[in-house]
Image (cartoon, rainbow, N blue to C red):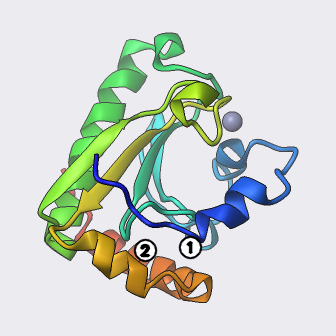
Amino acid sequence: MRHLWTPWRLDFIRGPKPKECVFCAKIHADDDIELVVARGEHVYVTLNRYPYNNGHLLIVPYEHVPSIEYLDDATLLELMKMTNQAIQALRAAMNPHGFNVGFNLGAEAGAGIREHVHLHVVPRWAADSNFMTVLADTRTIPQLLQDTYRELKAHWPHE
Ligand SMILES: [Zn+2]
C-alpha cells in the first residue's frame, strides 16, 4: 500500500480518547451530526472523521466486539453487502481508480479503536497522495466531510 500523508490524523493519535466507545455512541445518534451514511439491521456505515483519503468509509457492526470472529452469520453477510454498497456509492459519487478494503485487528495491526471491530473502505486515485497534500490543512477536513457525506448519501444504492 502506497503511503498517504495524513498529518490531521495526529489530532486523533495524540488527542484525548473519549471514555465511551465512539462507534457505540453513533448507534443512536443523529445521522447528519455523526455522518452515518447508511444503516442496516446489523451494521451501519459512517465516514471516518480522521480519513486516510477523501471518502474513507467505515462499516461498523452494532455489536461491540473486537473481531469478526464474534459476529454471527447475519451480521457478517450484511457487513459484506454494505461494503458492496459503499463501493458502489463511492464509484458513483467520486469515480475512484481503486479501493483498499480491510480490517485492522488489534493495536499491533494499526487499529485505532480496537475494542469495536470495523471495516475500512478507502477509495484511491492515481494521484491521491498529491491530492491529499493539498488538503493537509486540518481546518478543511470538517467541510470536506460534510460535502462528502451529502454526496455519498445521494448516491447510496437502494436495493
Ligand atoms: Zn463499541
- At x 64%, y 66%, the residue is 30
Q: Which of marks 2 and 1 is in front?
A: 2
Relative depth, front residue between 35 and 100: 100
Tell me residue 55's x, y (percent). 36, 67
Residue type marked 2: Tyr
Asked if one can make out residue 157 in the rendered structure from this viewpoint, the answer is no
Please tell me whether mark 2 sits on a helix, a strand or a loop.
Answer: helix
Asked if one can make out residue 98 in the rendered structure from this viewpoint, the answer is yes
Q: Rounded to the nearest whole Å, what is the CA distance between mark 2 and mark 1?
A: 8 Å
Q: Name the residue under label 2.
A: 149
| Disc 1 residue lies near ligand 1 with CB under 8 A | no
Determine the image quadrant of residue 119: top left
User: How many residues crowd mark 2 within 10 Å: few (<14), some (14–19), many (20+)?
Assistant: many
Marks 2,1: beta carbons within 8 A: yes
If the picture is divided into quarters, which one holds ligand 1?
top right
Q: Mark 1 points at which residue?
A: 32
- At x 23%, y 64%, the residue is 90
Q: In the shown orientation, is residue 157 left or right of residue 111? A: left
Please tell me whether mark 1 sits on a helix, a strand or a loop.
Answer: helix
User: How many residues crowd mark 1 within 10 Å: few (<14), some (14–19), many (20+)?
Assistant: few
Residue type marked 1: Asp
Classify 151 as above or below 26: below
Classify 87 as above or below 61: below
Q: In the shown orientation, is residue 4 left or right of residue 61? A: left
Tell me residue 49's x, y (percent). 57, 65
- At x 60%, y 81%, the residue is 138
| Disc 2 residue lies near ligand 1 with CB under 8 A | no
Relative depth, front residue between 96 and 33: 96
Determine the image quadrant of residue 13: bottom right
Tell me residue 5's x, y (percent). 44, 66
Determine the image quadrant of residue 101: top left
